[in-house]
Image (tube, helix red, strand yellow):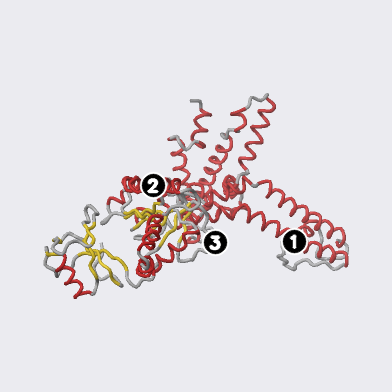
Amino acid sequence: MSGRDFLHAAFHDPRTHAYRVVESTVWALILSSIALLVAEPFFEEGSRGDLMLQKIDRVILWLFAIEVSTRILTFRPPELEVFNKPPLGRLRSEIFSRIRFALTPMMLVDILTVLALVPALRGLRALRLLRLLRTAKLFRYANPFQGLTHAFEEDRLLFTFAFSVLGSETILGGLSLYLVERNYNPEISSLGDGLWWALVTITTVGFGDITPITNVGRFIGGAMMIGGLFTLALFAGIVGHSLLNAVLSIREEQFRMSGYVNHIVVCGYEMGSGMLLDVLGSEIDVQEQRVVLFGPYERPRGLRPQFMWVQGDPTKESELDKARITHASTVIVTGSRRVVPQQADATTILTVFTIRSALKKSPAAAKRKRPIRIIAEVLDSENVQHARTAGSDEVIETRRVGYSLLAHAVVYPGVADATSRMVFDGHQNLYVGYLPETIDTPLTFEKLSQHLRAATGCLVIGYRDPETGKEQVNPRGDAVVTPDMEVLYLSSEPSLKGP
């Protein structure tokens, strides 16, 4: 490897050891420089300590200058990696590509920092704080500062047009006012005064230090004011188009960096699933136990503010941490209504499998007291076993449940209404609970039912083996219930401690 290749790798290739050494050195210089800025106010100006800090600061600035210059000089124009050019064309690419690289936002920050070597520009030293943005790793998925940089680069033609309009208006307005009022207005003695007035006027700042006094000058001022309104609207549109998504990407990091634990994650939520949120709100306190909606779309309009939205793809293991899946209590995977049932179930099964795979690799999941429960909605009954194999703890066949109620109501009128009132209206509901410690077990199902009916008022309809998940509904009265069983019962509210 030649010396030029080594320097290029050290300043531009993050995969190399030399690059990591250079970045570590730059990081140390940034921290040292910030420490000097903090310490400087504590020393009297001109004192021995102050002079010492200034010398150290100049050494650091010179090191920054060497680093920035080397970074620019070792930059390789991308077009020369693709095309063969004659010597003159190669020289032109080398020069203009390095100029464009030096004018990128982060390089401009570095260059402005180095300009503090000029005594009159020492105030620019504070800009070195912005260098932290280049090496900061605070954001894992969507660094908003990097997004802002990309927005400037991708829409540079729009920004060039906007600044060209601003510059043209400023020059025309300032020059016109100078030519009209230079012999009448004592506040305008040079072209610079005219340009300063034009810039202040067109940006609607209006300091009032320079005011037109002639009729023509006032006409120019009015035109500048109206032009300023359109210019500000132009900038607002460009900034809104270019920077909004970059700034809003912070939301992708918001929940990952939060301290939420024991929340509920809903994967695959769509606006047609709004009833799910209604029934969730009736079952749990959404203020105490957060409900996080995790989907690949932007937050739906009209979604209530108590539900948090995290944009991401739950079928990608690398994005699950956005919703802090490893810290959740329950994950609900809903089926999409936008596609055919088989395709919706395929996405559901893939999501469940991805979550289980990520949990096996996560150190945080291994430290949990109780495992995460995954509840999956399946639209086609043929996919129930596939969803269980993928890792679902419970599988809800929503379409089959609805169709079964419809068919059952044909033969037994009133059953569907009674079931709906019992489940949906909340008068009675089905619960699963542990046996009370005050009950001596084992005992028969008949005696257990009588005891719990007298003690709590609930109606016991069966029991469940928590290991296998098999239920016995309406068993024989002499069936023996052991202490490790869970009880299935109907009640207006939970009467027994749940799992």
365 or 46, which lies in front? 365
259 or 267, which lies in front? 267
Amino acid, disc 2: Ile
Q: Residue at x 30, y 66 (%)?
A: 430
The mark total stands at 3
Q: Can you give x and y, in whole percent of width and height, for residue 186 in the image?
A: 83, 66
Q: Residue at x 49, y 59 (%)?
A: 272
| Residue 352 to residue 214: above or below | above
From the image, state whether disc 3 or disc 2 is nearer to you.
2
Determine crowd level at label 3: few under 14, some 14-19, many 20+ residues with C-alpha closer than 10 A.
few
Is residue 284 in view?
no
Amino acid, disc 3: Arg
Is residue 419 in view?
yes
Residue marked by disc 3: 301
Residue marked by disc 2: 349
Residue marked by disc 1: 228
Q: Can you give x and y, in whole percent of width and height, for residue 54 in the image?
A: 52, 52
Alpha carbon separation for disc pair 1 and 2:
57 Å
